[in-house]
Amino acid sequence: METEFRVIFNGEIAEGEDRDSVALKLLPILGLDISKTEAVFSGKMLVLKTTQNRQQAEKVVAYLARTGAVAHIERAPESDTAPTATNEDPTPEAAILSPTKPKITITESSDEKPSRIVQRLSRFKERLQYRFDTFMAKGSSSSFKALLIVFLGFFGIIACIRAGVRWLSPDTVQQYADLGVLGNIYVTFLQLTDPGNMAQDILSSGWYKFFAILAGIAGVILLSALIAVITTALDQKLAELKRGRSKTLEQGHTLIIGWDEERVVEILRELIWANESENDACVVILAEQDKQLMDEVLRMRLPNTASTRIVTRSGSGTLLSNLDRVNLTTAKSVIILAACADTASYENKIRSDAMSIQTLLAVTTKSQLKENYAVVAEVFNETYREIIKTTFPDYVVTLDSSDILAKLMVQTSRSVGLSVVYSEILSFDGCELYFHTAEWRDTRFGDLAYHFEDGVPIGVRDANGKLLVNPSQCYQMKSGDEILIVADDDSTIKFEPDPIYIAQDFPLSDRRLKQMTECELIIGWNHKARGVLSEFSDYVASGSEIDVVIYNATEAERREVEEINAELGNIKINLMDINPLDRSQLIALQLERYGTVIVLASARLHSDTKTIDSENIVTLLLLRSIFEEMDKVRETKLITEVLESQNHALIAQAGVKDMIISSRLVSMITAQISESPGIKEVYDDIFEEDGSEIYLKPVSLYFDDIPEQVSFADLIAIAQKRNESCFGVKIKALENNQDKNNGVILIPPKDHLFQLCPEDCLVVVAEDEL
């Protein structure tokens, strides 16, 4: 006799389980109601199942364990080997549970087998439904495949039945009696694909007409479904394209990561000018913005992109998958924009820098080193810039917009018209800075200007990479040296072995400007103010004073001004708490005392650029009205910072000759470096007070008696006598004429004749402004 095994339960439950919750799950399995809870969990031994298959008993134990009940397996005694379902000697425990059942059994009784089959069918149905849902969720292609399967199914069934009727009953009336089995199958195909083909059975018997009608109805339904699927697929594809998630296959493109409307538009404007000589240039923008929004803004702001195509994609620049979508590995340069404006809070700038560093990590992971390849990133924090410089590849260049703008603002305040000069040489629209090499034939640096039809050299980069801006005129050019030249276009730069211009030798005046103590005024306060004051201290004479107007200055701002005043020992800084939008308070400042008035874009109370520019425009109009009423003992220079380039024309109407358009200048520099990475070193040199910089100096410093006519080649020669490199002229009479570039003429033909007056200026690269 075979050994039998019993599944025993004595009320034990798994650790951590609650008896009532276990009872709610266990009793329905046993076929008992909740009133039997105490009996089942009394601790008495209950035989739940008897079987000769131990594996089956273990499955029962495992099944019960899911409810939290702990059951055990033991061998049945010899006297208990009869099947449980027919045992006529019920135990007392079984009698407590049910007066009619001798023992509790599960899964073996014949009445439970149908329910198990139903459960299996239910699970099979669920799995089938799940697989169908998964298949259909893959998109339109799955819908098309499903329709194709249904079509083939209908076609097969109807064709087989029609062919069967034709085979079984050849005498059945058919319109085309000579059709064979294959012919009937073909007729079914025609009726499925075009219900009009049902007319082919108009004279056939009822059976054939029935099949024709069935095929026609199925065809109409399937065709309608197919049209719906195709329409949905097209809509989904268009929606995907509008979201900007598709891959680009561009090569040799400039990649811009990030979005700031003003910055992006200005950078694109520069790149469009830079690419004018190319037949098919491309700029790709990757930003966490809606593609449709970006496209709409660019269409409105840049209606004519010439030969440059602009492609936008939506996504984060920190994800490698997104960088693959914009084909980073084939890009010629990458520009990473800050995630916040220059007027944002310190906390937002720190977050922006962290995002820029993360983006740099992703970009450098995917980048492939190429000639003149550059990754330009705007980073606000100096510590982060140092980390990037020491840990990232050399082709990564970081920019500090605040530092650049502070230096430009102070330099512009020293020479009226300098902002126009910078706007031209920093832009691709007009003359630019280029590096150029040739066979110099031991020519002196001072003589080079007369060997070029277009352009004036202002520096040298030797074979070791050392840059010399405005070197000695006697510097002997050597093989491997490159010149830094200001020219209209690199295609027009050509070194002629022999001089093509001869300059007249005019005597140089011994006049020099005297450095005197100054009094300057700064209206407004922002994060660039410290840099502006520090730059001023490098230029002005010791003992000069700078008045700073901060309306309702906070205690922190007052402390900062005091700290700067203590740090800069050669100048005195005075804090004045007045409202710059109040004309009477501005008059009380006695504006005639100041040589320069700088109006900063103050983001103290709000960071909205439109509001800041609006307030500055009002302040400038008030200042202009006050200046017009003053007795002009001397001309006060008025410089302002502008955040939005679209306000340029409005501010020019306020009588401002020099303005620093923050977004435009920084965007120009960014675009220039992305096209020519080596130019960054040039900017670092000319923006520093140490070394040579760009100045506008009056003609009276060069001539005691100004000639009636003088050529541009003559002006280059006389500037060289002061060890300066002249590359332009500013005509005083035209400085208010915007159509004439405010009188600034850069790189005129060297034989062009000028009739100058003492107030006209030469645009020179020199070591100082004296």
Image (cartoon, rainbow, N blue to C red):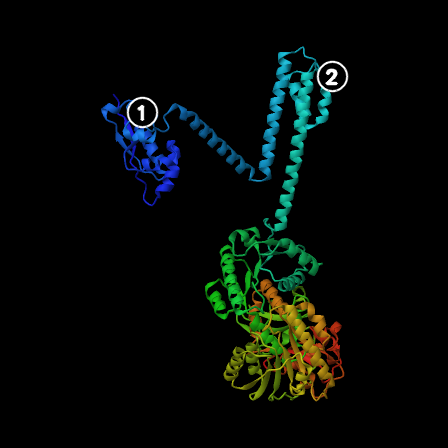
**From what the image shows, is residue 368 above or below residue 715?**
above
Residue 766, percent across and down? Answer: 61, 79
Q: Position of residue 571 (x, y in %)?
A: 55, 86
Residue 750, given in percent of the width and then of the height, sits at 71, 74
Which residue carries the number 2 mark?
A: 203
**Left or right placement of residue 372 versus residue 221 in this view:** left
**Which one is in front in this view, the residue at disc 1 or the one at disc 2?**
1
Relative to 127, 143 lies left or right: right
Judging depth in this view, the residue of 29 and 645 nearest the camera is: 29
Amino acid at the residue labelled 2: Leu
Q: Secondary structure at mark 1?
A: helix
> Would you say the residues marked 1 and 2 are in contact, meaning their CB atoms lie under 8 Å apart?
no
Using the image, determine if residue 539 lies above or below residue 339.
below
The Cα–Cα distance between marks 1 and 2, rounded to whole angstroms, is: 71 Å
Relative image position of residue 603 (x, y in whole percent): 59, 72
Crowd class of label 1 (few under 14; some 14 to 19; many from 20; radius 10 Å): many
Q: Is residue 302 visible?
A: no
The residue depicted at 48 percent of the width and 62 percent of the height is 392
User: 162 or 642: nearer the eye?
Assistant: 162
> For the residue marked with disc 1, what is the amino acid?
Thr
Q: Quadrant of residue 226?
A: top right
SS label for mark 2: loop
Q: Considering the image in quadrants, where does the C terminus appear?
A: bottom right
Q: Which numbered disc, 1 or 2, marks the residue that appears first in the sequence?
A: 1
Relative side of 75 to 238, left or right: left
Taking depth in this image into account, of 228 and 116 the one nearest to the observer is 116
Q: Which residue is mark 1?
A: 84
Q: Nearer the viewer, residue 428 or 712?
A: 428
| Residue 100 against residue 34 in the figure, above or below | above
